[in-house]
Amino acid sequence: MSGQRPRRAAITGIGVIAPNGLHADAYWKSVREGLFVLDRITREGCENLPLRIGGEVRTFDAEDHIEEPFLVQTDRFSHFAMAAAALALEDAGLSRGEPDDPYSIGVVTAAGSGGGEFGQRELQKLWGQGSKFVGPYQSIAWFYAASTGQISIWSGFKGPCGVVASDEAGGLDALAHAARAVRRGTGAMVVGAAEAPLAPYSMVCQLGYPELSTAEDAERAYLPFTTAARGFTPAEGGAVVVVEEENRAREREAPVRAVVAGHAATFTGASQWERSREGLAHAIRGALDEAGCAPEEIDVVFADALGVPDADRAEALAIADALGAHGRRVPVTAPKTGMGRAYCAAPVLDVAAAVFAMEHGLIPPTPNVFDICHDLDLVMSRARPAELRTALVLSRGLMGSNAALVVRRGSDSAL
Amino acid sequence: MITTEVTFDELATLMKKAAGITVDPQELTQDPDRPFDSFGIDSLGLLGIVGEIENRYSQSLPPDSERCKTPREFLDLVNNTLKAGA
């Protein structure tokens, strides 16, 4: 009965807009098959920039999901966020509009940069034509908080809302924030992250990152844990999940797909990759501790997999430091090598993949990575069948944040 | 002298362009007192329309034009201003 079990944060819906799939099911199918979709960046105005390879979301039509007035007001990154939110709500069987208790559902998103494409367009009008030609929605669309606000307005959900601006690992921090809100009394949270970094101004902003891969050849651009590692490839897209109080979900007979069990985050400074070893290990220990989870219980690790030699080494060592002997045996995977890193959305996409992996008893492979130089059991070439009860998702940001999240399989959650 | 006047047709086009709201111009003509907010246009949306008109006719509209509640009120204000400035 309600109230007799402790409040737990269940995942009851998943929405994905990714370079390899415009729906969570399509995304999982691509991830499971190890589909490789990195390719030349084709968006207008990007052709002559020294960043060639990316994970583009192609054939996406925001109008399939969201009414036009919201699209006029928002940047592409919010289009991804709102579409993913609409898909997540649909998956969870929750309706929007005028909910019975609008204050029982909140929204939290993470974003790394905001609406660069929209902002560029309006700033070009400012300097090209004059201030009177700048549209009023510039005031909100560029802002990294725009997605949370627009999802809240669009859905009518007026519960606790927030925006996490904590670097790439913010995707996991947002999930933790949502789980805490649910444990504190909120009925459900719509939570996730979306990014649209493949537009001219946004790409120029990234060119200063020493970790960025400027490879010309998609097959050689993003090869974490290998001797050929030369940086990461950016991607666009987003993932949103519904995190719901478990008893509430069971009462309305919604499937509990997974439980957000533990999280911790640390900070070790920008581009200090050797130091991220200690920071990431500490985050893993903290997440396990909060989840009440022994290292041996971790059945799969979704790695951050930055693709920078020092960072890869630090991550492999952090896994060993935190999980002990189990760290060398536990299967590790990085599906993002097939589609790129969508900044804050990357770890949320990994959480989505982790939920599907646990449901299907299948660890997806690390696409296009075949020969690694670290002491890890990296799943390569094809998906590996395994009984999966608990997954560990790792994320690090270029500015120095490290985060770890433990998710448990839903079917075990009634225990 | 050519007197310019913003019509309901033009307003409907601007509502689509500046705020993404699709509305039949006939509807605006027949019910010009139906409030903007019932179409989903808030003050930011109307501010975008104000900017479009100002740029198109090279004339400033009065401050707070975006606070007009209905298409009739808005077009009266716009057309009186354009007439006075012509």
Image (cartoon, grey):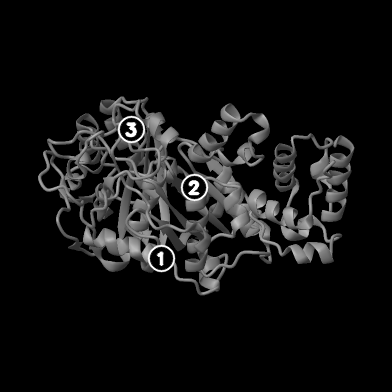
Total numbered labels placed on residues in the image: 3
What type is the residue that disc 2 sits on? Arg
Q: Amino acid at mark 3?
A: Leu
Q: Is residue A177 visible?
A: no
Q: Specify whether A80 is left or right of A284.
A: right
Front-lying residue, A390 or A269: A269
Quarter holding the C terminus of chain A? bottom left
Answer yes or no: are tags 1 and 2 on the same subunit: yes
Give residue B80's position: percent from left, percent from top: 89, 43
**Residues at badges 3 and 1 in contact (C-beta under 8 Å)?**
no
Circle nearer the N terminus (2, 3): 3
The reply, left or right, for residue B81 in relation to residue A412 is right
**Which of label 2 and label 3 is nearer to you?**
3
The answer for which chain carries disc 2 is A
From the image, tell me which residue sits under label 1: A257
Residue nearest the observer in this picture, B31 or A198: B31
